[in-house]
Image (cartoon, helix red, strand yellow):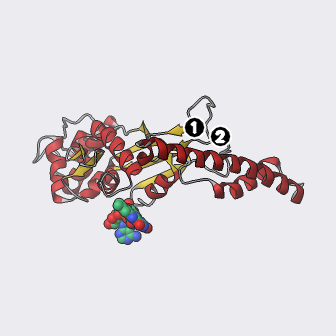
């Protein structure tokens, strides 16, 4: 639902908001190091990178030994495919401006992800926004045809939801207004198109995000989710150069950006 009616009802690119990152509880780290009589210093700034290194070093109690820099340490994790260590690095992203068809693909990524998505039962989709498929963004005539179809469906949805609400009221006069609206929306939403915009809050760990970027940033993926992977890649590379440095955005021959990964599925 567009909470601001002045917004353009048609959206053309995903929006990624980085809402959460981790913090190291320094006093507790110091307490552990003192209890164990070991030393640990790091040149990493991102808590996610520091936590992943600490997690990895816990395996062999290698604090203060071996590889010196965080990048050197995490590089070895990537090349040796000791990917579970990257599960200790976590980011929370709020994603908007994406279609329901994109999120249907996104939520197929199970391991290491948590999702909370806008409900079409509780939220009135009467003034929903719609995501223009990238191909239609390149061709005015097709976009026009697409937009007419969407406008038609939008009107049909509003009329159907209203008629359904009246029917539920007649059939169940005892029902609370809130429940009646929910019943009406849950039936009427069946006519909403895949292009309907949605918002989804996604929490994922470093290993899971890497896998997502590899599969969905590829030229074989659907173009809309590929554009999302490009955005997410840019955000996460900035957040953690050491966990994502072997993953890069490049320009594919088809004229669109894509993501390529050196260390596949760690
Ligand atoms: C280009 C492309 C086309 C696709 N086309 C289709 C399609 O036509 N139809 C369709 O249904 N899906 C399709 N998918 C979705 C795909 O099949 C996966 O569901 C999706 O990419 C998530 O991948 P995943 O299972 O590896 O990820 P996750 O669920 O995040 O799992 C990550 C990894 O954990 C391990 N894992 C997770 N769960 C289990 C388990 N239960 N048992 C054992 N190991 C597990 C696996 O190693 C897995 O790779 C497509 C995906 C892509 C990228």
Q: In this view, does 127 lie to the left or right of 208?
A: right
| Residue 158: % across, % down | 72, 47
With respect to residue 249, does 82 lie above or below?
below
The residue tagged 2 is 127
Residue 265, position as x, y percentages in the image:
26, 59
Cβ atoms under marks 1 and 2 closer than 8 Å:
yes
Which residue occupies 56% across, 48% down?
196
Q: Is mark 2 within 8 Å of ligand 1?
A: no
Pointer 1 or 2: first along the chain: 1
Q: In what element is the residue under mark 2? A: loop
Whether residue 28 sits left or right of residue 174 in the image: it is: left
Q: Is residue 132 visible?
A: no
Badge 1 is on which residue? Answer: 9
Query: Where's the N terminus, which quadrant?
Result: top right
- Is the CB–ligand 1 distance for label 1 below 8 Å? no
- Residue at 31 percent across and 39 percent down: it is 234
Which mark identifies residue 151? Answer: none
């Amino acid at each position: 639902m567009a909470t601001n009616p002045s917004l353009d009802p048609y959206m053309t690119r995903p929006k990624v908001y980085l809402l959460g990152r981790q913090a190291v509880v320094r006093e507790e780290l110091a307490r552990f190091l003192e209890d164990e009589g070991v030393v640990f210093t790091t040149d990493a700034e991102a808590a996610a990178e520091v936590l992943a290194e600490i997690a990895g070093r816990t395996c062999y109690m290698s604090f203060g030994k071996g590889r010196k820099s965080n990048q050197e340490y995490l590089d070895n994790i990537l090349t040796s495919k000791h990917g579970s260590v990257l599960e200790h690095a976590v980011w929370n992203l709020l994603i908007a401006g994406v279609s329901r068809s994109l999120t249907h693909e996104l939520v197929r990524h199970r391991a290491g992800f948590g999702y909370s998505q806008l409900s079409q039962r509780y939220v009135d989709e009467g003034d929903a926004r719609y995501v223009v498929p990238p191909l239609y963004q390149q061709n005015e005539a097709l976009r026009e045809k697409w937009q007419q179809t969407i406008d038609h469906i939008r009107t049909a949805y509003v009329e159907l939801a209203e008629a359904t609400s009246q029917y539920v009221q007649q059939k169940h006069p005892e029902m609370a207004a809130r429940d009646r609206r929910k019943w009406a929306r849950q039936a009427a939403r069946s006519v909403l198109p895949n292009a309907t915009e949605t918002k989804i809050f996604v929490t994922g760990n470093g290993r899971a995000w890497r896998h997502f970027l590899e599969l969905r940033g590829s030229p074989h993926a659907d173009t809309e989710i590929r554009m999302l992977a490009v955005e997410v890649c840019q955000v996460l590379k900035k957040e953690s150069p050491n966990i994502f440095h072997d993953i890069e955005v490049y320009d594919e021959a088809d004229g669109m950006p894509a993501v390529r990964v050196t260390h596949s599925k760690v």
